[in-house]
Amino acid sequence: MAGTVLKREDDGAHHLVRTPRANRNLSQKLGTFSTLSEGLDYAALGVTGFNFYSPRGALQKVLPYAQLRRQALSTARKLLSLGLKRGDRVAVVAETGTEFMAVFFACQYAGLMPCPMPYTMYIGGREAYVDRVAGMLRAARACAAIAPDDLLDMVREGAGRADIGRVLTHGELQALPEAAAKLEPFGPDDDAYIQYSSGSTSHPKGVLITQKAIVANTLGILNGMRITPQDRAFSWLPLYHDMGLVGFCLAPVMGQVTVDYLATTAFARRPALWLKLISENRSTLSYSPSFGYDLAARRINGEAVTLDLSSWRVAGIGGDMVRADVLDNFSNTLAVAGFKSDAFTPSYGMAETTLAITIADVSKPIRVDTIDRHALKTQGRAVPSLAEGARGFVVCGKPIDGCEIVIRGDEGAALGERSIGRIFVRGPSLMAGYYHNAEATGAALDGEGFLDTGDMGYWLDGEIVITGRAKDLILHNGRNIWPQDIEWAAEQVEPLRGGDVAAFAVENDSGIDDVVVLVQCRLADTGAIETLRHAVSAVVHHSAGIECRVVMAPPKSLPFTSSGKLSRAAAKLKYLTGEIAEVTQPVFLQAAQ
C-alpha cells in the first residue's frame, strides 16, 4: 500500500506503525534551510513523518518524510509530463491525506506553484463550493487542477466556469509517465505557493508567499514553540488554511517533527476524538481556534477521566479572538485528565504574514488583561479595571524574530502603551502581494512595506493584545466571512434588490460576534414581512453556514457613500444607536401613525 509502513506481529496480522517522535541518528535543525525542498531533503534523512487517522480514530496511513520525498520527486516528473512550465500554477484540493502532501512538495521540486483549495463543501452546499473553486482557479490563473475522486465533478464544473481545461484525479496523475526532464526545484529567491486569504467567494485573493517568507516564518514558529527532538504534533486543522498548512505541515517538515492528523470533517463530527488521540499518542503540540476547545470540552462528557493529557505542553490558540472564558472552561473540564492550563499558548497571525506574527511565551501562564469597557469605546484606551462589566482580553505575546509591529492612531502616528489603534506589520514573513491583484496589494501594503492587518489592538509590556477588527470582515467560529457574500445571497430573495441589505458583526456581552443582517422592507403585510425575514435567514444559513439576526429596516434607511456604495460602518452605527428602528408592522400603517 502506498504511503504506509507495515509491521508483522506475532499473530501474523499486519499493522501500521506510527513514525517515531524523534530521530536517533539525525541532529535536529530548526528551519535553517533556504527552501521548502531543502527542508524536506534533510527531514527525509531521518525516520519522522506524517500519520493519518480515520474518523473512528484508527491509524490509516503512515508517510515518513523519506517516503514523502520519493513520492514528491516522482509526482514532480509526472506533473512536468503535462507540459507545464516553470512557475505555472497547480491548484490542488487540500484533503488531509498523503496525496495532497505529495503534490504540494512535488510542485516545489518541479518549480511549479501549488495553490491549495478547500476540501469541505458543507458550508453553503454544492453551488457555493463550485463558485468558490471557480473563483480561486480564476484568481490563480491555474494551469491545472488536481482533485480527489469524490469532488472531481464539482472541481471540473468550477474549472469550466474559470475556463481551466486540465483537471485530473490523483489516480490519473499517478498513471502518467514521468518526464525525462531534469528537475529544477525552486531556489531561495523564488516564490513558494499561493495561499487563499479572506476574500469574497467570487473574488478571492491569492496571497503570494515566497521561499524567503516561508523559511522566515517557520523558523519563527519553531523557535517560538521551543521545539525539541521529543516533540510530537497533532492537528485537525484544514490544510488549505494557513494555520493548518504552515503551522502543522510545513513548519514540522522544516523542524523534522512527526505530526499525527485527523481530518477536519472527522473532528467536526467527533471533537472529543482530538483529545483521545492526543492522549494515546502522548502529543506535545496542538493548536485550535477557541471554538475547537469549546466543542471538545462540551463533547468529552465523562470520558475525561480516561485520558492523560499531561504530555500536552503547547496548547496553541489562534485563528479567531482568544476567549478567556472558553480556555477556563476547557482547563477546568480537562484538569482531571492532567491537562495543565499553563500549556495554553495564545498567538496572533494571518495568511498575509505567512502565518505567525506573535507567539506568547510557552514557559509562562496565559495572561488576561481586564479593562474598562467604557474607556475602550469612548477613549480608545485600555484602562485596567476590576469593576463589574469590565472586559478581559488575552495577551497574545511578543512579535516573532524579525517581525516589526506598529500600532497607529487615526492620524497615522505610532501609539504607546495601552492606546488602542490599528495594527501594522513589517518583516521577512510578509507576502509578496496578492497574486495578479495590484489594487488589493496597494491597499494592504504601504510605501514603507507595512501591512495593514485591519485588526485593532494595543501594547502591554511589549506584547500585543487584540481587541477586534477595524475592517468589515466578519469573524465567526474561526472563519472569515465577507459581508458581501451574505448581502448578495440575501438580495436574491424576492422582492429584494441590490443595495437592500447590509451585513455586519456586533459583539455581544460574551465577547462573541453576532451577525446582523439589515434588510430594507417595503412590504405592506405583516405576514409577508415575517415570511421575508425567515426567507433571508434561511438563505444566509444555506450560503454562509451561520445563524444571523435579520432586522427589517424602513425603506431608504441604509446609508450610502458619495460614490453610491453601501456604507456598512454607517449602517452598523445607525443600528447600534437605534436610529434604524425595526419594522414590525406594514409600512403604510407606520406612515399613517
Image (cartoon, grey):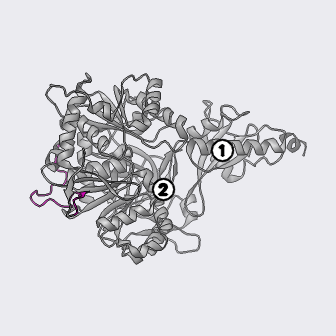
Label 1 near label 2: C-beta < 8 Å?
Answer: no
Find numbered disc 1 in the image and state the secondary structure of the residue it sits on.
helix
Q: Residue furthest front?
A: 11
Q: Nearer the viewer, residue 101 or 457?
A: 101
The tag on residue 406 is: none
Distance between the alpha carbons at the discs numbered 2 and 1: 23 Å
Q: Main secondary structure of the magenta part?
A: loop
Q: Nearer the viewer, residue 302 or 175?
A: 175
Amino acid on which the number 2 mark rests in the picture: Arg
Q: Is residue 304 above or below residue 131?
A: below
Quarter holding residue 591: top right
Q: Is residue 307 above or below residue 232?
A: below
> Which residue is found at the position 26% from the left and 61% from the top?
232
> Which residue is found at the position 62% from the left and 43% from the top?
540
Mark 1 — residue?
A: 538
Left or right, 411 with respect to 4, comes to right
Residue 508: percent from left, percent from top: 60, 59
Left or right, 138 with respect to 583, comes to left
Mark 1 burial class by Cα count in 10 Å: few <14, some 14-19, many 20+: some
> Which residue is found at the position 41% from the left and 30% from the top?
137
Residue 392: percent from left, percent from top: 50, 67
Mark 2 — residue?
A: 269
Mark 2 burial class by Cα count in 10 Å: few <14, some 14-19, many 20+: few
From where the camera sits, is residue 531 visible?
Answer: yes
Could you tell which of marks 2 and 1 lies nearer the N-terminus? 2
